[in-house]
Image: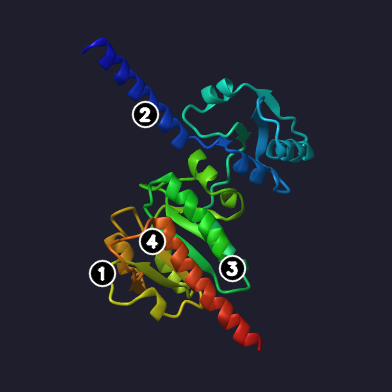
Amino acid sequence: MSKDKNQKHIKRRRTQKSDSAVETRNDLIFGLHAIQAALELPVTRVTEVWLADEREDARVTAIIGAAKQHGIVPQKVSREQLDEMMPDARHQGGIARCRPLGNLDETDLYKLLDDLNVPPLLLILDCVQDPHNLGACMRTAEAAGAHAVIAPKDRASGLTSTALKVSSGAAERLPFVQVTNLARVLRELQQRGVWLVGTSGDSETTLFDIDLKGPLAIILGAEGRGIRRLTRENCDQVVYIPMQGGAESLNVSVAAGVCLFEASRQRNLWSANKVT
């Protein structure tokens, strides 16, 4: 192997290794929006903050002020030091160390459902492995008024640093529940009166033709593969999103937005009519 090719090979391996580190670790969060969101909570997970010494702007000033409310004094460091802490991460000049998010499981989910005084709206992600998609789904689910996002522990992304950044703070506020046996949880949700609506392009019923006002869980599948066979068998109904043009499918976070906001629209109309 030539010297130039060998150097390219080494560089590629280093990049792959650092990308993997960013995807899997969750004790650090990066990006100014993600750090600000974590600091805005009454009880923050943040324990340390590092900011690029070259940045002197309103966003950095806001982070410094929010950090001081929790007794944290951000450290000013060079951008090179930040790059070394999280190689290849788009940190925007900010990294924070956090206590890990608590792991929520089936028990926590059922307690959440018991404490709700409105029909639950849940998003279930069946083996979504891309943390960017998970983060986007968390952000969408919170915006649509979902009460929790549920995913299996195996063969699915968790709340990595990347997912936390992409969620733009939603992962700090919206419960994310990881379950060991998704099929069992689906059956338990049915026993609790939650209607399970799966999505698939080969369904004959559109999303816009069904009632989404009651206790509801929207189930979306992995990128390119859709929901698994066993998951589909546990659904009460399977629908598709009608589309125009040449696109055959939507990104999972976009599909989540379409489904959840349609459910939110129906529920808001129902509530308004009920009041009048």
Q: Provide the residue designation for mark 2.
A: 16
Q: Which residue is mark 4?
A: 220
Residue 128's mark?
none
Inter-mark Cα distance, 3 to 2:
44 Å
CB atoms of marks 3 and 4 within 8 Å? no
Q: Looking at the image, which residue sits at the far top?
A: 3
Q: Quadrant of residue 47?
A: top right
Count of marks overlaid on the render: 4
Q: Secondary structure at mark 4?
A: strand
**Image x and y of residue 103, in percent:** 54, 47
- Sequence-wise first label, 3 or 1: 3
Q: Amino acid at mark 4?
A: Leu
6 with respect to 39 (left or right): left
Is 61 left, or right, of 108 in this rendering?
right
Q: Which circle, 3 or 2, is nearer the viewer?
A: 2
Question: Which residue is nearer to you in this view: 69 or 53?
Answer: 53
Image point 48% across, 52% down: which residue?
Answer: 136
Instruction: Give coordinates of residue 171: x percent, y percent.
Output: 56, 50
Q: Residue 270: give x, y in percent of width and height.
A: 56, 82
Label 2 element class: helix
Where is residue 144? Give x, y as percent: 55, 64
Q: Residues within 10 Å of mark 3 (few under 14, many from 20)?
A: few
Asked whether the residues under the numbered discs 2 and 1 touch, taking CB atoms below 8 Å apart as contact, a structural biologist would say: no
Disc 3/disc 4 C-alpha distance (Å): 24 Å
Asked if 211 appears above or below 189 in the picture, the reply is below
* Vertical order, 57 against 250 (above or below): above
Mark sitting earlier along the chain (3/2)? 2
Classify mark 1: residues with Cα within 10 Å, few (<14), some (14-19) or many (20+). few
The residue that label 1 is drawn on is 202
| Residue 160 visible in image | no
